[in-house]
């Protein structure tokens, strides 16, 4: 890994919400570290996913979807993370959904750096009913920006992911590795646990509740191969708390069980997870609250 000519670099994965950025990252590094759901605002933090091979170390930066619809302090913070991430990397991968390019995509495209290699990754090509639509779509997007490369991919089917890796590799600078060969992320177990729980909330709740939800880990204790985790789900209103808990606590218990199982897989050991719900009105517009919750 320290041989002459070894390459290491940072790659920002950017795009509007729901284009498949986190799914792409997880499949590139072959491990789930970034949570996914069909709802916008699922990814709220900058997350590094690390892929290391004999020739290069790729440090992928999964970013929040660029927000144009909601104007809370939280969304402004997330947009700032996206813009900052594009300034701090060596390569940008701009992700758009196959067959779909709208106003939100165009707004992200306007923010793309001109001084860095930008690779266009066209995601979800497996969802195109008419594959003949792909080439005209590629030509249409290629006219909008001078991309260094264009790679159509399907993360779920692992199609063209090696081609995307090779497209990125050619633009990485020669550097020794930053992380150990077996590391897949720089995020702590505590952070990953909170994200897995938040994912279950996003997947199980209706459209309104997730955007008013965050997760705080109150306690994280490691005892040998056992992790004892006490987590609090924050909501903004009492009625949201009731919805999350569900009748006789069944919905909250179901979310906690699913999160615990995922934690045990990712962390490689038994997890004791205790979860409760707390009302904290206005947290998404409170700068101090956002900072305490780890939003950059």
Image (cartoon, rainbow, N blue to C red):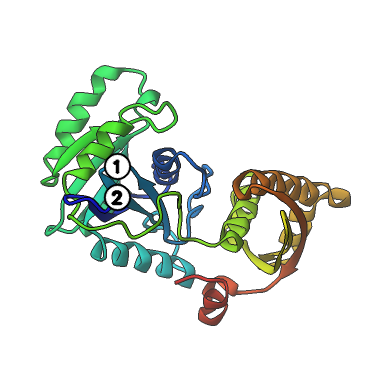
Q: Are marks 1 and 2 in contact (CB under 8 Å)?
A: yes
Q: How many marks?
A: 2
Asked whether, in this view, residue 269 is left or right of residue 160, the answer is: right
Asked whether, in this view, residue 52 is left or right of residue 31, the answer is: left
Residue 141 - label: none
Q: Nearer the viewer, residue 135 or 188?
A: 188
Which residue appears at 37% of the width and 46% of the height?
Answer: 51
Residue 236 in the image: x percent, y percent? 66, 68
Q: Is residue 107 in view from this perspective?
A: no
Image height check: is 202 above or below 98?
Answer: below
Q: Nearer the viewer, residue 77 or 121?
A: 121
Q: Quadrant of the C terminus?
A: bottom left
Which residue appears at 41% of the width and 69% of the height?
Answer: 76
Residue 133 in the image: x percent, y percent? 25, 22
Q: What is the crowding at mark 1: few (fewer than 14 residues within 10 Å), some, or many (at least 20)?
A: few
Nearer the N terminus, badge 1 or badge 2?
2
Asked whether, in this view, residue 173 is left or right of residue 281, the answer is: left
Residue 285 in the image: x percent, y percent? 52, 75
Residue 114 in the image: x percent, y percent? 12, 57
| Quarter of image, res 222 | bottom right
Q: To which residue does mark 1 refer?
A: 54
Q: To which residue does mark 2 refer?
A: 1
Q: What is the crowding at mark 2: few (fewer than 14 residues within 10 Å), some, or many (at least 20)?
A: some
Q: CA distance from mark 1 to mark 2?
A: 6 Å
Image height check: is 33 above or below 233?
Answer: above
- Looking at the rendered structure, the secondary structure element under dot 1 is loop
Image height check: is 286 above or below 183?
Answer: below
Which residue appears at 65% of the width and 51% of the height?
Answer: 201
Outermost residue, bottom side: 288
- Looking at the rendered structure, the secondary structure element under dot 2 is loop
């Amino acid at each position: 890994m320290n041989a002459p000519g070894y390459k290491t670099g940072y790659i920002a994965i950017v795009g509007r919400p729901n284009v498949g950025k986190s799914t792409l990252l997880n499949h590139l590094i072959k491990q789930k570290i970034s949570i996914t759901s069909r709802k916008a605002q699922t990814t709220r933090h900058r997350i590094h996913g690390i892929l290391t091979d004999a020739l290069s170390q790729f440090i992928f930066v999964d970013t929040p979807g660029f927000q144009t619809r909601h104007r809370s302090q939280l969304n402004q913070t997330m947009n700032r993370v996206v813009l900052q991430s594009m300034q701090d990397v060596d390569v940008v991968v701009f992700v758009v959904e196959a067959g779909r390019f709208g106003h939100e995509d165009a707004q992200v495209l306007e923010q793309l750096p001109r001084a860095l290699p930008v690779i266009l990754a066209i995601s979800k090509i497996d969802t195109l009913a008419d594959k003949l639509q792909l080439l005209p779509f590629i030509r249409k997007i290629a006219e909008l920006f001078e991309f260094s490369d264009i790679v159509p991919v399907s993360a779920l089917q692992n199609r063209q992911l090696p081609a995307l890796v090779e497209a990125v590799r050619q633009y990485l600078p020669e550097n020794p590795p930053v992380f150990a060969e077996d590391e897949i992320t720089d995020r702590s177990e505590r952070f990953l646990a909170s994200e897995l729980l938040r994912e279950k909330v996003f997947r199980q709740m209706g459209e309104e509740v997730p955007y008013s939800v965050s997760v705080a880990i109150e306690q994280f204790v490691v005892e040998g191969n056992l992790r004892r985790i006490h987590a609090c789900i924050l909501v903004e209103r009492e009625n949201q708390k009731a919805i999350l808990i569900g009748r006789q606590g069944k919905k909250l218990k179901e979310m906690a069980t699913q999160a615990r199982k995922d934690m045990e897989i990712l962390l490689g050991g038994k997890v004791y997870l205790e979860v409760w719900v707390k009302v904290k009105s206005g947290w998404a517009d409170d700068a101090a609250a956002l900072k305490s919750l780890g939003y950059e």
